[in-house]
Amino acid sequence: MSKIACASHILVRTEKDAKSISQQLRKGGDFAALAKKHSTCPSKNKGGDLGEFKKGTMVKQFDNAVFTKGSEDKPFLGPIKTRFGYHLIQVLYKS
C-alpha cells in the first residue's frame, strides 16, 4: 500500500466552480495554469503543487481520494469535498 504521494490540487469554494474547471481540464486545460488562476489555496503560486506528503497527513476525504483512487494514469480526481471546499487533485506519483 502506498504511504507517500506527491500531488497538486485546485481548491475552490463551490461545487459549481469545481465542475466548471473540471470541464476545462477534460478539454485539455493546463492543470498548473488553472490552479494559478482559480485556486484559493496558497499552493496556487506553485501551480497547485503540494509536494510530497505521507498518508494520513491531509484531511480524510483528500487523503482517501489520493491513496485509494489516485493514479498517475488518471489526469485528475474530483471534485472532492472537504471542510476547505472542493478539490480537483492531480496525483503525480505514489510510493
Image (tube, rainbow, N blue to C red):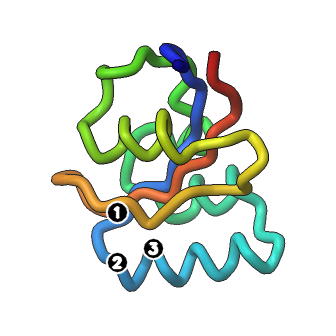
Residue at the outermost left position: 83
Q: Are marks 2 and 1 in contact (CB under 8 Å)?
A: yes
Decide: few, some or many residues near mark 3? Use Cα within 10 Å; few <14, some 14-19, many ≥20.
many
Image coordinates for residue 1, horizontal then vertical, percent? 52, 19
Q: Is residue 52 above or below residue 38?
A: above
Please report the residue visible at 38 percent of the width from the left and 46 percent of the height from the top: 41
Q: Are marks 3 and 1 in contact (CB under 8 Å)?
A: yes
What residue did someone put label 2 on?
15
Q: Are marks 3 and 2 in contact (CB under 8 Å)?
A: yes
Image coordinates for residue 89, horizontal then vertical, percent? 53, 50
Mark 3 and mark 1 lie on one chain; the one further toward the N terminus is 3
Give the number of the disc on residue 63.
none
What is the distance, in whole Å, between disc 2 and disc 1 at their CAs?
6 Å
Question: Closest to the observer: 58 or 21?
Answer: 58
Please report the residue visible at 59 percent of the width from the left and 26 percent of the height from the top: 6
Question: Closest to the observer: 55 or 58?
Answer: 55
Q: Is residue 39 above or below residue 73?
A: below
Mark 2 and mark 1 lie on one chain; the one further toward the N terminus is 2
Kind of residue indicated by mark 1: Tyr
Question: Closest to the observer: 86 or 66?
Answer: 66
What residue did someone put label 1 on?
86
Q: Secondary structure at mark 1?
A: strand
Please report the residue visible at 44 percent of the width from the left and 66 percent of the height from the top: 79
Give the number of the disc on residue 18.
3
Kind of residue indicated by mark 2: Glu
